[in-house]
Image (cartoon, grey):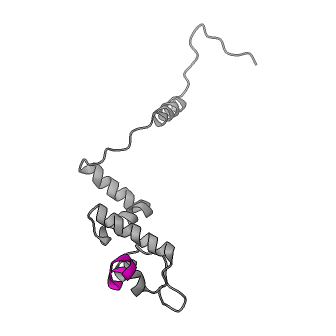
């Protein structure tokens, strides 16, 4: 179906569907000739986005940014950093294995000293 029919079924306008498309909130719907075609799967995807906007009281731009945070590791890292700095997120916990690894590396870096009196060395 074309965009006008899709918008009617979704209870929105073709203009709002185009806006959501520009934000990256629509699945690929363009045919080689340039016309948008919506099937049932595309309608369900757009309906899910609309339901998320309504449920969380957000706009399409906010939803698009949320998807960007999930899709782009660099953006996710910067948003996490902000969350940690303002106290909304706690830093990731130090892992026990990382501590043990660092401890082992420190021990390996030590230079062995001369043998203590009374210790034996293995026979060759």
**Residue at 35%, 69% in the rendered image:** 50
Q: Nearer the viewer, residue 8 or 100?
A: 8
Question: Residue, x 28% and y 70% (percent of image)?
Answer: 59
Where 30 sits versus 119, above or below? below
Question: Magenta residues: mostly which secondary structure?
Answer: helix
Q: Nearer the viewer, residue 36 or 114?
A: 36
Residue at the far front in the pictured view: 9
Question: Compared to 73, does 28 lie above or below?
Answer: below
At 74% from the left edge and 15% from the top edge, which residue is drawn?
Answer: 123
Q: Establish if 53 lies above or below 97.
A: below
The verdict on residue 76 being magenta is: no
Which of these two is toward me, 8 or 116? 8
The x and y percentages for residue 112 are 56, 25
> Is 2 on the left-hand or right-hand side of 83?
right
**Image spot of residue 67 (x, y percent):** 39, 65
**In the displayed structure image, the side of residue 2 where residue 90 appears, left or right:** left
Q: Which residues are magenta?
A: 8-17
Q: Residue furthest bottom?
A: 33
Q: In the depicted view, which residue is nearer to us: 84 or 111?
A: 84
Tell me which corner region of the image, top left, top right, bottom left or bottom right, holds residue 8.
Answer: bottom left
């Amino acid at each position: 179906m074309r965009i006008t029919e899709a918008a009617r079924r979704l209870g929105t306008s073709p203009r709002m569907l185009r806006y959501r498309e520009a934000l990256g909130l629509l699945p690929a719907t363009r045919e080689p000739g340039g016309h948008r075609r919506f099937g049932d799967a595309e309608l369900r995807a757009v309906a899910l986005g609309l339901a998320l906007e309504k449920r969380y009281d957000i706009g399409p731009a906010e939803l698009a940014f949320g998807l960007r945070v999930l899709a782009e590791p660099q953006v996710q890292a910067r948003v996490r950093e902000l969350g940690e700095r303002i106290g909304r997120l706690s830093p990731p916990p130090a892992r026990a294995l990382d501590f043990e690894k660092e401890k082992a590396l420190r021990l390996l870096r030590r230079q062995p000293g001369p043998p203590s009196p009374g210790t034996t060395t293995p026979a060759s």
